[in-house]
Image (spheres, grey):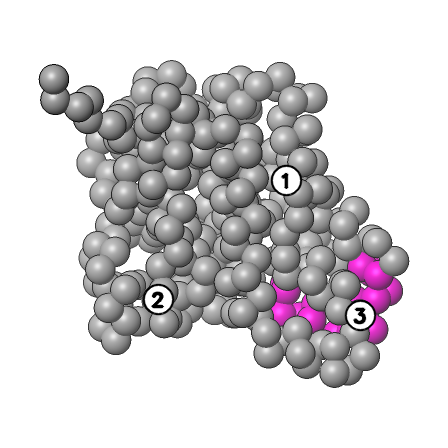
Amino acid sequence: MTAIPATSVANLRDLGGTPLAGGRSVRSGLVFRAGSLDRFDPGGDPAASALGLRTVVDLRTEAERAERPDRLPQGVRLVLADVLADAVSAHGAPPAARLRRVLADPVGAEQHLGGGRAQEVFEDLYRGLVSSASARAAYRTLLLELAAEDAGPLLFHCTAGKDRTGWGATVLLSLLGASAEVVEREYLSVNAAVRQAFAPLIEGFTAQGGDPEVALAVIGVVPGYLAAGLEEVRVRYGSFEAYVRDGLGVGDDAVARLRSRLIETPTPPLP
């Protein structure tokens, strides 16, 4: 769980080093998470260029990709995995897929998200991250990419790198054997970076009379959001293993490859 101080990528983190059961940890330099890559500048950003990425999995909607397309180094393979495709309707996408527009409209934000409704909206979003067909297909794609025989360093991201990306990290770390406490700590650890990245929008929102609590509920993450997703897993599947196998359709062989690639076992001390 290492924050990487890149200048052109917000909320960039290496999941390497995350502690797992039995004294093991996630192997470093193989799986990264981030916010949008529309400003990614590997040529002028040493921290970004040092990642050595081979694959990027973009979890955003078609509209988000069109508005702010990824900028990737030559040779990096882009995989599209739209988590919220089923949630996009004639009325638009959920707030997680239009953060900038929500924060540009304090009146609309208060109408739709004020009075505690933001918490309810995001808890429903997380239930959908577990149950919807598009979300299950997207997270299946992510896990299979990580389990591929020829997989190299991979980065997955959405817009802010907190909800769709946060759930992806939760699925992966849970599958690798991280405790519930470690999973939640990693999930919540992005708050400072996200708030920094969106600070100008938050300031503009409140300057126009927007409720700071609504802004923070939209931009940040809280334990209740994650708890809603975890409860949906429990109710629908009973366990994370069953969710991955039956919900995402990722077989035992792929899970074994993924664990073999990403789990680092400590070297026993010399006698």
Q: Is residue 64 left or right of residue 6?
A: right
Helix, strand or loop at mark 3? loop
Alpha carbons under labels 3 and 2: distance apart: 31 Å
Tell me which secondary structure the magenta stretch mostly adopts.
helix
Verify CB contact (< 8 Å) between mark 3 and mark 1. no
Helix, strand or loop at mark 2? loop
Instruction: Name which residue type carries label 3.
Output: Asp
Q: Which mark is residue 6?
A: 2
| Residue depicted at 23% across the width and 63% down the height | 49
Tell me the residue that label 3 is attached to.
211
Instruction: Name which residue type carries label 1.
Output: Leu
Q: Is residue 141 above or below residue 115?
A: above
Q: Is residue 89 above or below residue 194?
A: above
Q: Is residue 232 left or right of residue 35?
A: right
Which of these two is toward me, 25 or 168? 25
- Residue 107 belongs to the span the image colors magenta: yes
- Residue 250 belongs to the span the image colors magenta: no
- Figure quadrant of the C terminus: top left
Which of these two is toward me, 234 or 25? 25
Q: Is residue 59 above or below residue 131?
A: below
Q: Earlier in the sequence, mark 3 or mark 2?
A: 2
Q: Is residue 255 visible?
A: no
Which of these two is toward me, 159 or 261? 261
Tell me the residue that label 1 is attached to.
226
Q: Position of residue 39 (x, y in %)?
A: 39, 72
Label 1 crowding class (10 Å Cα cut-off): few <14, some 14-19, many 20+?
many
Instruction: Name which residue type carries label 2.
Output: Ala
Helix, strand or loop at mark 1? helix
Q: Earlier in the sequence, mark 1 or mark 2?
A: 2
Q: Position of residue 235 (x, y in %)?
A: 69, 21
Magenta span of residues: 98-114
